[in-house]
Amino acid sequence: RSVIGWSMSSRMTAQLACNALQMALWQRKCPENVIVHTDRGGQYCSTDYQSLLKRHNLRGSMSARGCCYDNACAESFFHTLRVECIHGEDFVSREIMRTAVFNYSECDYNRWRRHSACG
């Protein structure tokens, strides 16, 4: 389990979701016929996001309405990010917060953190 695409903004927009997906595509060398699972947020239902999926031959999958367990892996990561990286910190700028999230995601979480599924 690892974070392969992420993006930050002050607002949750379709462009933000597209940026994260494009990073994931770059990290994985543009795979095809991969299932991309998301919740039912408007950013993922947007024409831009759906077009990006189609353009790269990806199959979109969305959680069932009101079923948070369908997206448990992502929800677990965001909880861990908040607890281990964000809570108790006083970030003086978005850039400092972006750097902290980058360091946590790319260094701590992806490389060093043991995941329950791995033993």
Image: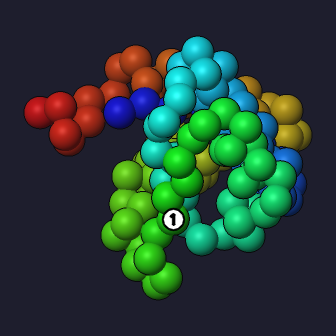
Q: Residue at x 63, y 26 (%)?
A: 25
Front residue (pair 110, 68): 68
Expressed as whole percent of the image width and height from the top left, the position of residue 65 reads: 49, 82
Task: Tell me the quadrant of the picture where the N terminus can be found.
Answer: top left
Residue 63 in the image: above or below residue 18? below
Q: Residue at x 60, y 47 (%)?
A: 86
Expressed as whole percent of the image width and height from the top left, the position of residue 34 reads: 47, 37
Front residue (pair 73, 94): 73
- Residue assigned mark 1: 62
Model colouring: rainbow
User: Relative to 57, is 16 on the left or the right?
Assistant: right
Q: Residue at x 44, y 77 (%)?
A: 64
Expressed as whole percent of the image width and height from the top left, the position of residue 17 reads: 73, 49
Task: Tell me the quadrant of the picture where the C terminus can be found.
Answer: top left
Residue 87 in the image: above or below residue 7? below
Q: Residue furthest left?
A: 119
Residue 12 in the image: above or below residue 91? below
Residue 60 in the image: above or below residue 117? below
Any part of residue 97 in sight: no
User: Relative to 119, is 65 on the left or the right?
Assistant: right
